Image (cartoon, coloured by chain):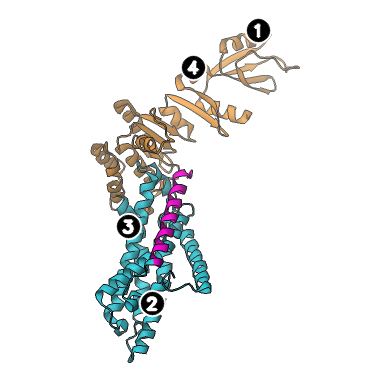
Amino acid sequence: MFGLPVSDPRASIEARRRIGFVTEDKELYPYMTVDQILRFTRPFFSTWRSDLEQRYLKMFELPPKCKVADLSKGMRSKVMLLLAISHGAELLILDEPSDGLDPAAVEEVLRELVALSASDGITIFFSSHQLTEGEQIADRVAIIDRGEAVVADSLDDLKARYRRLHIVFENELRTPIQWVDGAEHVRYEGRSVSILASHNVEELVQQGRAIPGASVEQFPVSLKEIFLEHVRSN
Amino acid sequence: MLWMKAWLETRWRLLYTLAIPLAALALPHIIGGGATSQKAADKATHTFMGVMAFFSLFGAAYLAGAGIKSQSPFAAMKGLEGSMYYTLALPVSRLRLILVRAGVGLMEFGGVSAVVYSAFWLFSPARGSSTPFDLLKLILAAVASMACFYFIAVLLATFLDDPWPTFGGMFATIVVWFVISRISPPPSINLFGFAGDASPLITHTLPWPAMGISLIASAILLWVALKIAERRDY
């Protein structure tokens, strides 16, 4: 990471200095107040950004005197984000950062992350089960199913490449069609077939149109559709 | 700031560890307030020392909790234990994490011993002909002789969650106590000798052999704890 061998204890410390981390469970020291945890964390990072600390403290409406144990999960998410962002990290690793936040707060957080990435050049590794969030802010996405990356590409490329084809035939098919390469998932439903195409879309359209009496329509697909198709097929 | 964290995590333990033996001192037959003869005073001294040895053992196990896994007993009771990941994400070596936490606990253990033995020495007529210098020797002997029990809990806390290091430490302590009581070693090498016939209040000297055995065992236990913490994948 950053060209440093993380298995080396010293290099690992340097890497951690440059990484902001939001854990999935959002657990912080429950006996500390928000103010105490800020005072505790600040000295570990020479790159601490007091301007960001003040800005997000105000924006997230975090009560400085409130103990972490008394905060809701959403508020703890905000405290973790505040800590991760304020230390001037070059890489933010955010595991479900919007967990527990209301929809308005999610929008606010996502907007801020995009702005931060654009203004400070921070790389954000964002892990979420909410695919719409990833779709909203990601440049590159990876879909992991049972520990294996089934999709990994830039979001724009994915959206440009993937298409949903809906082909309706005149009569019910007697034998399944051997579709050209690119048909990732094919689902037959009576006189119609739904194809998720990952590439060769035009060839697939031509193949569909070549069937007498068939009508072909193509639609853009969302990240959620790509995810669902991959997971269902596995 | 790790010192602040360790203090916040152990302050309640310190209070309990201090309050119980101090409350025990209020009992007349423990402090020896009613002793009218030297024999009665000596008996009171032995009773008090026995009580103190007992509390030192359990206090040591209770104050330890120097591991990476354990945080605060109250946090554990509320199921808030995940703050370990926040600690591990800080740019600090595991060696420093453990040494600071173990150091704070050991200082607290020394502080408790100093307060309780001093209170006994000040208020009990059973102190006999001992001097303040003998009291200092007693405190040193008590902390050094009991240190190995403290570091058993330190070791356990590198891989067990709260409150198991305390219980494990207490269990190990009982086993060692039982073994020592069965083999009855000479007072000079008996880890509990400082609370009996080898007490500096009686002998006016430090029980160096017992202190040495305990400190060597402590160093080994700490070394093992550091190695475990360094290699363990939390």
Q: CA distance from mark 1 to mark 3?
A: 77 Å
The amino acid marked with disc number 3 is Trp
Secondary structure of the residue carrying tag 4 is: helix
The amino acid marked with disc number 2 is Met
Instruction: Give residue B2's position: percent from left, percent from top.
Output: 32, 50
User: In which chain is the residue bearing label 2?
Assistant: B
Q: Magenta residues, as a range?
A: B209-234
The amino acid marked with disc number 1 is Ala
Main SS of the magenta part reads: helix
Q: Which mark is residue A210?
A: 1
Secondary structure of the residue carrying tag 1 is: loop
The amino acid marked with disc number 4 is Ala
Q: Residues within 10 Å of mark 2 (few under 14, many from 20)?
A: many
B232, above or below A223, in the image: below
The outermost residue toward the bottom is B36
According to the picture, the residue beneath numbered tag 2 turns out to be B49
Is residue A212 or residue B115 the one in the foreground? B115
Instruction: Give residue A28's position: percent from left, percent from top.
Output: 38, 48
Q: Do the residues under discs 4 and 2 have CB atoms within 8 angstroms?
A: no
Instruction: Give residue A181's position: percent from left, percent from top.
Output: 62, 14
> Which chain has been coloured cyan in this picture?
B
Instruction: Give residue A5's position: percent from left, percent from top.
Output: 42, 32
Q: Do the residues under discs 3 and 2 have CB atoms within 8 angstroms?
A: no
A121 inside magenta stretch: no
Q: Which mark is residue B7?
A: 3
Residues at discs 4 and 2 both on one chain:
no
User: Looking at the image, can residue A181 be seen?
Assistant: yes
According to the picture, the residue beneath numbered tag 4 turns out to be A160
- Write the residue at 32% across / 41% down: A82
Q: CA distance from mark 3 to mark 2?
A: 28 Å
